[in-house]
Amino acid sequence: MKKVVSIEGMTCGHCQRHVAEALRDVAGVKSAVVDLAKKNAVVESDTAVPDEALKSAVAEAGYTVTGIAEN
Ligand SMILES: [Cu+2]
């Protein structure tokens, strides 16, 4: 399964890495690729990962999720 998470607040490569690591730590997430220019992260998982889990991981890292789309 793939979800595209829109994220506000990332400004540099450190933010990008920080968010990617936070998302990869969410249970069930296989990979998370953050695109700084597009302000999003593509999250892949074998099983459904709740949007809330992704949102809180990003929030704990200090950024804001503005939307999550199934892809
Ligand atoms: Cu930064």
Image (cartoon, rainbow, N blue to C red):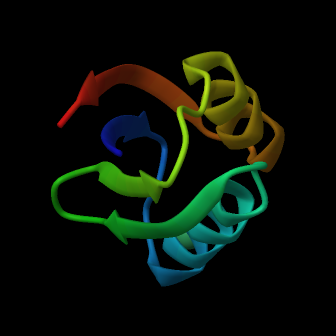
- Which residue: 78% across, 49% down? 27
Along the line of sight, the residue nearer the viewer: 56 or 25 = 25
Query: Residue 54, position in %: x, y?
Result: 62, 34
Tell me the quarter of the image containing the C terminus. top left
Above or below — where is 19 with respect to 5? below
Q: Quadrant of ligand 1?
A: bottom right
Q: In this view, does 2 lie to the left or right of 61?
A: left
Query: Residue 41, position in %: x, y?
Result: 36, 54
- Which residue: 41% across, 38% down? 7
Query: Residue 31, position in %: x, y?
Result: 50, 70
Residue 8 falls in which quadrant of the image?
top left
Q: Is residue 1 left or right of residue 56?
A: left
Above or below — where is 49 with respect to 27? above
Along the line of sight, the residue nearer the viewer: 50 or 17 = 50
- Which residue: 30% across, 65% down? 36
Above or below — where is 25 with respect to 39? below
Tell me the quarter of the image containing the N terminus. top left
Query: Residue 22, position in %: x, y?
Result: 73, 59
Residue 34 falls in which quadrant of the image?
bottom left
Q: Is residue 45 left or right of residue 34?
A: right
